[in-house]
Image (spheres, rainbow, N blue to C red):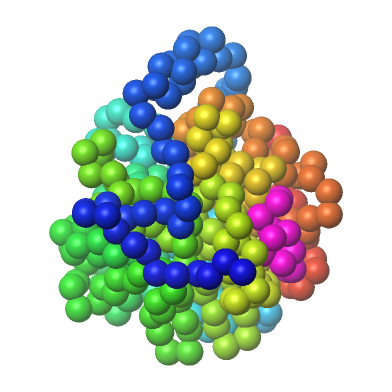
Amino acid sequence: MLKIEKARREGKRYLNPLPTSVGGPAMLGKVLWRYLMNREERTPKKPLGPFKTDIRLYAQAPSSGLRITWIGHSSLLLEIDGKRVLIDPVWDERAAPVQWAGPRRFFKPPLHLEEVPPVDAILLSHDHYDHLGAGTVQQLARMDSQVPAKWVAPLGVGTLLVKLGAPPSQVTELNWTESARIGDLTITALPARHFSGRGLGNRFETLWASFVIAGSHHRVYYGADSGEWEGFAEIGRQYGPFDLTMLEIGAFDPLWNDIHMGPDGAARMFQALGGKGLLMPIHWGLFDLALHGWRQPIERIFGAKGLKIWAPEPGLPSEIKPGIELRSEWWR
């Protein structure tokens, strides 16, 4: 039986839980050729939205104890058993080192960052630009309403958060299998099959992770970015079952199967995790990060059989109730 263990390093570089190909110069040549020949609708032809969050809903806690607001891509506001967790916040215009070039948002955030209600924790899964927006972190760190929030991130990412303005005393770094407690909420970092780095020269030097977020009555799994691997089954056995499982479906391609599972992989890994509760597709619909059509991930996961899907429109605070699906078709 596979054992879920802490991350290991070789020199400065963290290792994946099993050998994983990230790609090098040879892959760049293959991608460039396909990019030049590509005819997919990778960005929407028509403007999307505007989407608008009714922030008055946050004045009342969800009766079920579990509510999600999908901001887009992998950015989420999770309300679980009386606690609020802001996950991988990116309000930045572009998922890039600069804001004048790089992948640009398909739609504006459905609520201003200043409108986000006070949160108990801000959770970062890794340091890639589509998960950690520098401008977003800097603004959150300056907001009086978010001063009490705990910042939780994998090893090494906390250093970047502090550089961007997060108060050092509020930052907790976790290795895989380690946990942070915030009242009766427990956030546990677990392995993912991915990589890190905000430049080509510092890949693997900070850790990446998936997370179990467990409240007093509900358990949620946030898969972040990951390729398929047999560890999902053991995560389900040790830490499940989950009321909601969030798995990536976008930015996938056969060339990088090791680090992004895509919709077909998400369906398989959801079943490996136990197949209980609802599957929420994330990591799609906001940035052009691959060669597939922008709608393809959600179309494929909607077409998969035997899945209970939770896919709200951007910005809608949606209360989760056992066994009840939500399949918004805003993207059509």
133 above or below 189? above
Residue 253 in picture, x, y percent from top left: 56, 32
Q: Residue at x 52, y 74 (%)?
A: 213
Residue at left 52%, top 30%? 255
98 relative to 86, above or below: above
Q: Residue 185, image x and y in percent?
A: 48, 84
Q: Which residues are magenta?
A: 267-278
Which image quadrant: the C terminus?
A: top right
Residue 4 visible in the snapshot: yes
Q: Nearer the viewer, residue 283 or 201?
A: 201
Magenta stretch contains residue 150 = no
Number of numbered discs visible in the structure rendering = 0
State whether residue 67 appears in this view.
no
Which residue is most to the left? 163
Where, by quadrant of the figure, is residue 145 drawn? bottom left
In the displayed orientation, state which residue is furthest to the top.
37
Image location of residue 119, percent across then percent down: 40, 74
Kindly identify the residue that appears in the image at 57 percent across and 88 percent down: 216
Q: In the visual, does 196 lie left or right of 84?
A: left
Nearer to us in this view, 208 or 11: 11
Residue at horizontal 68 percent and vertical 79 percent from the top: 64
Quarter that holds the N terminus? bottom right
On the image, which quarter does residue 325 sit in?
Answer: bottom right
Seen from the viewer's position, the closer of residues 119 and 251 is 251
In the image, residue 285 above or below residue 232: above
Q: Residue furthest right?
A: 306
| Residue 107 rendering spot, x and y as whole percentages | 49, 39
Answer whether residue 268 is magenta in the image. yes
